[in-house]
Image (cartoon, rainbow, N blue to C red):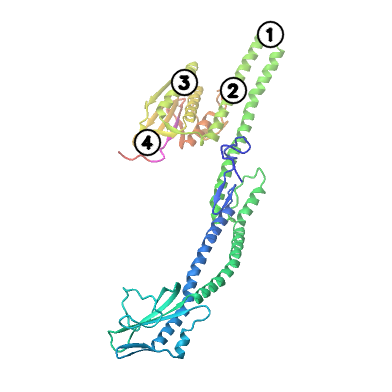
Amino acid sequence: MKKSPPDEPATGESLPPDTRPAPVSFGLFQREQRSLFGEILDWMLTPLLLLWPLSLALTWFVAQGIASKPFDRALEFNLQALTQFVAVHNGQVSFNLNAQARDLLRADDSDLVYYQVLDPRGKLVSGEKEFPLPSEEEVPEPGRVLLRDDMVRGDEVRVAYTWLVRNDPTQLVLMQVAETRGKRSTLAAEIIKGVMVPQFVILPLAVLLVWLALVRGIRPLNELEQRIRARKPDDLSPIEESAIPQEVAPLVSSINDLLTRLKASLSTQRRFLADAAHQLKTPLAGLRMQAELAQRETDPHEIHGSLQQIARSSSRATHTVNQLLALARAETTGRTLPSARVDLARLVNGVVQESVPRALEHGIDLGIEGAERVPDDCLIDGNPILLQEMVRNLLDNAINYSGRGGVVTARVLVDPFSGVQILQVEDNGPGIVASEREFVLQPFYRALGTDVDGSGLGLAIVQEIAQQHGASVIMEDAHSDRHPPGLLASVRFTPKTPRKPV
């Protein structure tokens, strides 16, 4: 069947790369869709079908050798029997056949027998004159019977020959007997027939047994398919690995890993939706209430106050939505976003400059200390967008809790020997008590006793992004001897491979 090339489908429409069928060829067969069963069957049957003619050819050569052996022994026997009639008298060689000897030379219906006797001078004593001689390079071995293939009168023959010693050891008489190959070919053909006929029966039987073996061999795969198809859509539990073949275990393990990650992703999405609904409920309810109050009021001052409350509530709702989106992006796509070599000092410096207007608005003294740039061999692998989000949330948290007149300092510390980098954000706010430092890294948790507006997501975003980059978050008092002690938030980046000493 003629097929359209991949870039010109038969329908005239372009197919997506993942839906366009690509023919796959295995062995002697072709299939549009790759089949494990068919591939194994092809690779088992193709060598079998290719080796079968070779087997027949080898059988033919072996049969020729087997068929020749008994006739060679008979030919040798005839030669030795005829040598008894060779005699030497007064230097003259004679060959006298009696009735029994003539019977040896009688050919049957399928073959002819030729013979030749030559005296030591090479003169024909008796037999076929046109009989070919042995090779001139061959050294005569008196008394030893030798065999060769040759041609007599245009017929292929099998020749048995020997040299005879009668009176003088230096005078050798050559005796040769040849027989045509009719009986040999007939016997070889019979052997081939006896071998081929069973093979014509055995070959289809072997194919059937191979097919049945494969059907039984892939039965566990069919059972695994049925188990997976029988699952409910919300069942993301791992597949049982005890009843599957060892060869399929890595595949099932990979599927289980995918199910685990998919379950975690769906759980994250469900939690995000639940948290978003919960967090947006309060500001939206406030917006609705303030709007209803504004509709009832006739005093312009009261209406203006309600509008101010609506503006503040919408601002809080916008901030909450932005934080929820940042947390969702960090949790679900942090591992798939492209990474690059990041200069942490330059990145922090850029975020600090962006935060200066907001710090001035809150009356905060915002500064940066530490390395201005990181050495090229100390750059970290990370996603710049997420790292900027992490630094921005640390600065926003410090600015919100420091209060007017507070001081916020960001610094980057680099150890050129170990490659460890530490990002620190220090403020002089109320700090976080030791018993709550573990909880503030969880979404929507807010320390008690604070009157700062927030969603409780800033430090949770910091924790998630740090984990995505293999870093750890540490919180401690900035000044333990002062009151309030302030907060020192540190993010420690440890290289995956230790640096080699210079």
Q: Amino acid at mark 2?
A: Thr
Give the CA separation, mark 3 to mark 2. 19 Å
Q: Secondary structure at mark 3?
A: helix
Residue 267 x/y as whole percent: 60, 38
Question: Which badge, 1 or 3, comes first in the chain's sequence?
Answer: 1
Q: Amino acid at mark 1?
A: Asp
What label does residue 419 carry, if any? 4
Horizontal arrangement in the rendering, residue 17 relative to residue 394 (left or right)? right
Give the CA separation, mark 4 to mark 1. 65 Å
Q: Quadrant of residue 414?
A: top left
Magenta residues span 489-497
Q: Quadrant of residue 219?
A: bottom right
Residue farthest toward the top in the current orientation of the protein: 300
Q: In the rendered view, would you say 394 is above or below 251?
A: above
Horizontal arrangement in the rendering, residue 117 relative to residue 6 (left or right)? left
Question: Which badge, 2 or 1, comes first in the chain's sequence?
Answer: 1
Q: Amino acid at mark 4?
A: Gly
**Can the viewer see residue 447?**
no
Question: Which badge, 4 or 3, comes first in the chain's sequence?
Answer: 3
What label does residue 299 carry, if any? 1
Give the CA separation, mark 4 to mark 3. 27 Å
Question: Which badge, 3 or 2, comes first in the chain's sequence?
Answer: 2
Q: Residues within 10 Å of mark 3 (few under 14, many from 20)?
A: few
Q: Are marks 2 and 1 in contact (CB under 8 Å)?
A: no
Q: Residues within 10 Å of mark 2 (few under 14, many from 20)?
A: some
The residue at the point 61 percent across, 56 percent down is: 220
